[in-house]
Amino acid sequence: MVKFQCSIAINLVLLQCLLALVASQRFDFFYFVQQWPGSYCNTKQPCCYPTPAKPAADFGIHGLKPYYNNGSYPSNCDPNSPFNPSKISDLESSMQKNWPSLACPSNNGQAFWSHEWEKHGTCSKSVLDEHAYFKAALELKQKANLLQALKSAGITPGGSYSLKSIKHAITEAGGYTPWIECNKDSSGNYQLYQIYLCVDTSASKLIKCPVFPKGPCSSEIKFPSF
Ligand SMILES: *[C@@H]1O[C@H](CO)[C@@H](O)[C@H](O)[C@H]1NC(C)=O
């Protein structure tokens, strides 16, 4: 009887540990989303170059978003952790270059970063603080090197390519199948807008996507110049 009680006690402790672990994580993986500026700027919506300068013709970070395996996501997880630009001042020049905002009116990107941190970043706070969150995204961009991956397969801005060849080029370079989000240029043609890669909960390595988003596209798409 004593032994039985003991094992119940141990099980309760283990159960509590397990629950604490699950509760502290609260998400399953990240979508790391990068956008092609040429496809942001040639639609019916206006785009505005950031105040520092027109960004380079390269993919820019959109966000690093915690997701659940069922395809839904947590958001705005901690109103007590507002975006604090002074915490990432050492990353600012890299942020300007790699995570520019193309929203109007022209701005220095802080409103974009603030939105991403407060809506998405706060939901991965159990793993990454504000500085670690932005640093991880910058490092993932270097690692993924999408423009180079596409270029190696002969896919360059200004052409039209099969969706399949674009996915194949990125899979060859990074090891995992991406999801491609398309939007429409001002004439209504589908084009390469955003590329989604999946990343483990420590935001350090690419993984196979547990689930893909959904959205319309065509089998042949434009990769417009910028
Ligand atoms: C998806 O999973 C999360 C975490 O397990 C859960 O909180 C949420 O309710 C689920 N959403 C749907 C639509 O099933």
Image (tube, rainbow, N blue to C red):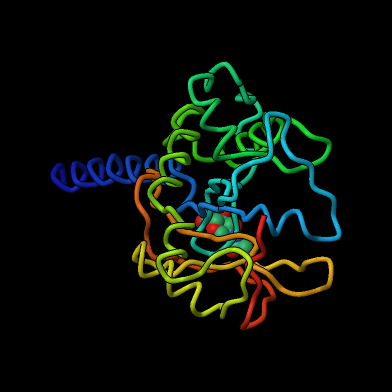
Which corner quadrant of the image does residue 128 belong to? top left
Task: Name the quarter where the C terminus is drawn.
Answer: bottom right
Query: Looking at the image, is 18 positioned above or below residue 219?
Result: above
Residue for point 76% across, 68% down:
184
Query: Looking at the image, is 195 positioned above or below residue 80?
Result: below
Q: Nearer the viewer, residue 176 or 129?
A: 176
Which corner quadrant of the image does residue 187 belong to? bottom right
Residue for point 62% across, 56% down:
36
Residue for point 50% across, 26% down:
91
- Give the image location of residue 183, x and y in percent: 72, 66
Extreme-left residue of the structure: 3
- Image mark count: 0
Residue for point 41% across, 40% down:
139
Judge from the rendering whether residue 144 lies leftward or rightward of residue 8; answer left or right: right
- Give the image location of residue 87, x and y in percent: 53, 19
Judge from the rendering whether residue 102 lies leftward or rightward of residue 135; answer left or right: right
Q: Nearer the viewer, residue 143 or 31?
A: 143
Extreme-bottom residue of the structure: 219
Judge from the rendering whether residue 13 lies leftward or rightward of residue 23; answer left or right: left
- Give the image location of residue 196, x and y in percent: 53, 60
Q: Whereabouts is ligand 1, in terms of quadrant?
A: bottom right
Which corner quadrant of the image does residue 72 belong to? bottom right
- Give the image location of residue 180, x and y in percent: 57, 68
